[in-house]
Amino acid sequence: GAGVSQSPRYKVAKRGQDVALRCDPISGHVSLFWYQQALGQGPEFLTYFQNEAQLDKSGLPSDRFFAERPEGSVSTLKIQRTQQEDSAVYLCASSLTPGQGADTQYFGPGTRLTVL
Amino acid sequence: AQSVTQLGSHVSVSEGALVLLRCNYSSSVPPYLFWYVQYPNQGLQLLLKYTSAATLVKGINGFEAEFKKSETSFHLTKPSAHMSDAAEYFCAVSKGAQKLVFGQGTRLTINP
């Protein structure tokens, strides 16, 4: 079956531009996560959705970052007024059940954002 | 607070040699632990996970890991390295019921 897909795979933005990154989770997966992976680092948590509800946004680095999942499936991560420090790979993951720490998270290929 | 430490940002082994990637965790409660592999320009793929059942966990591609509570470790091993094992490996702990906390990663290089 289809895995988690993300688009675009690569995005180049000029400093100050707004960007929108899309995630299509595995069909039927309740939980959706966004992570940010800087070059040479491990992924860091940004935000978590259970269906359409954003239950944890503690990892969003600033109010320029906004995520939504309005119908409980596709999610969009939006970054306003991009800065060079926003350059990273943005990973989306989904899991089948809500609130299960042992549940496997399935990752998409990521979107590599480069801010010039 | 839960966290993981991966010892060695780079590990190099010869093809056919033992692979050992180290991971230590800190957790106030029995953790759920994961090993993921990341190939260039790809997302993370689960190798194996510990969910407080058997302490020796077998995963895909011949990898296994042993949960040792007394050492707070969850090291990843493979008896015989293959060229296709060259990748970045991440240890992670589940924090609360949702997010994963990842280590810094270990880049594994296989020498022919």
Image: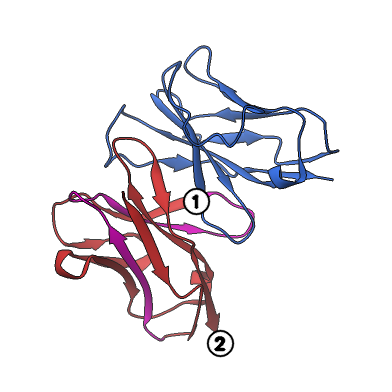
Chain colours: A blue, B red
Give the x, y percent position of residue A21: 67, 30
Residue B35 inside the magenta-drawn segment: yes
User: Callout 2: few (<14), some (14-19), or many (20+) C-alpha neighbours within 10 Å?
Assistant: few
Q: Amino acid at mark 1?
A: Leu
Left or right relative to A109: residue B89: left
| Residue that appears at 45% across and 52% down | B45
What numbered label is drawn on residue A93?
none
In the image, which residues are magenta? B17-43
Say which of A109 and B29 sits in front. Answer: B29
Say which of B16 and A29 sits in front. Answer: A29
Residue B105 inside the magenta-drawn segment: no
Say which of B60 and B1 sits in front. Answer: B1
The chain under label 2 reads B
Give the x, y percent position of residue A5: 58, 35
Identify the secondary structure beneath mark 2: loop
Q: Amino acid at mark 2?
A: Pro
Distance in Å between CA atoms under marks 2 and 1: 25 Å
| Residue that appears at 84% across and 45% down | A116
Give the x, y percent position of residue A65: 63, 29
Residue placed under numbered mark 1 in the picture: B44
Query: In the rendered view, would you say A24 is above or below B4?
Result: above
Residues under numbered marks 2 and 1 in contact, where contact means CB atoms less than 8 Å apart: no
How many numbered marks are there? 2
Give the x, y percent position of residue B98: 35, 35
- Looking at marks 2 and 1 on the same chain, the residue that comes earlier in the sequence is marked by 1
| Residue that appears at 50% across and 29% down | A25
Which mark lies nearer to you, 2 or 1? 1
Residue B81 found in image quarter: bottom left
Left or right relative to A65: residue B67: left
Residue placed under numbered mark 2 in the picture: B112
User: Callout 1: few (<14), some (14-19), or many (20+) C-alpha neighbours within 10 Å?
Assistant: many
